[in-house]
Image (cartoon, helix red, strand yellow):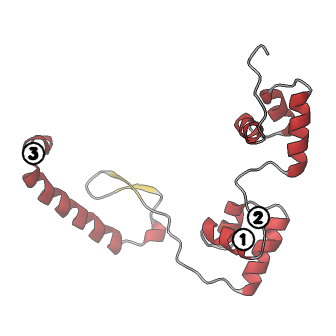
Amino acid sequence: MVALSELDLNNYTPIMRYRQKATIGFNNITNQAEKPLIYTDEYGERVKSKITHSNKSMTETEITGIITGHKNGLSISDLAHKFNCHRNTVINHLRKHGIEVTNSKISPEHSVEILQLYKNRLNVSEIAERLNISSSAILNHLHKQGVKIRGRWG
């Protein structure tokens, strides 16, 4: 097959279309829920199956559960798994109800503490260890706050 792909693309394309049709047919025959995330198809190649969530309309009790779970500290991905929906669905419902959703795991209380500790000459890794937050998150937060980062010996 390598010789065909290097010399003549017109001979290679029909072969790949045939393989793709055969793979699609194979995927339709078997039950998607029974396959693991990575499996070996009938041609002996490793294939990743996609995790799909059907578009789902949420009931008012589910939306209330999402809001309550978020207020209780559950992560977006935990809520999505719990309610069997996509994480964007969870984010959209939270935003519709006036709840600000950010990617940052740093709370406003931690923000003040991070700035104070950095001002008191602790380095990023020491702050991260003390607050149990990754050092990259600390560094990104300091950049967003406009703090000039000290050098290694500064």
Residue 95: assigned label = 1
Marks 3 and 2 sit apart, C-alpha to C-alpha, by 54 Å
Residue 4: assigned label = 3
* Picture quadrant of residue 15: bottom left
Looking at the rendered structure, the kind of residue marked 1 is Arg
Asked whether, in this view, residue 96 is left or right of residue 5, the answer is right
Residue underneath mark 2 = 100
For image coordinates 84% across by 51% down, the residue present is 107
Residues under numbered marks 1 and 2 in contact, where contact means CB atoms less than 8 Å apart = yes
Asked whether, in this view, residue 13 is left or right of residue 25, the answer is left
Q: Earlier in the sequence, mark 1 or mark 2?
A: 1
Instruction: Give the quarter of the figure containing the C terminus.
Output: top right
Residue at the top extreme of this rendering: 153
Q: Earlier in the sequence, mark 3 or mark 1?
A: 3
Residues under numbered marks 3 and 1 in contact, where contact means CB atoms less than 8 Å apart = no
User: Few, some or many C-alpha atoms within 10 Å of disc 3 (few <14, some 14-19, many ≥20)?
Assistant: few
148, 115: nearer the viewer: 148
Marks 1 and 2 sit apart, C-alpha to C-alpha, by 6 Å
81, 56: nearer the viewer: 56
Tell me residue 119's x, y (percent). Answer: 89, 29
39, 139: nearer the viewer: 139
For image coordinates 82% across by 61% down, the residue present is 73
Tell me residue 74's x, y (percent). Answer: 78, 62
Camera-near label (3 vs 1) is 1
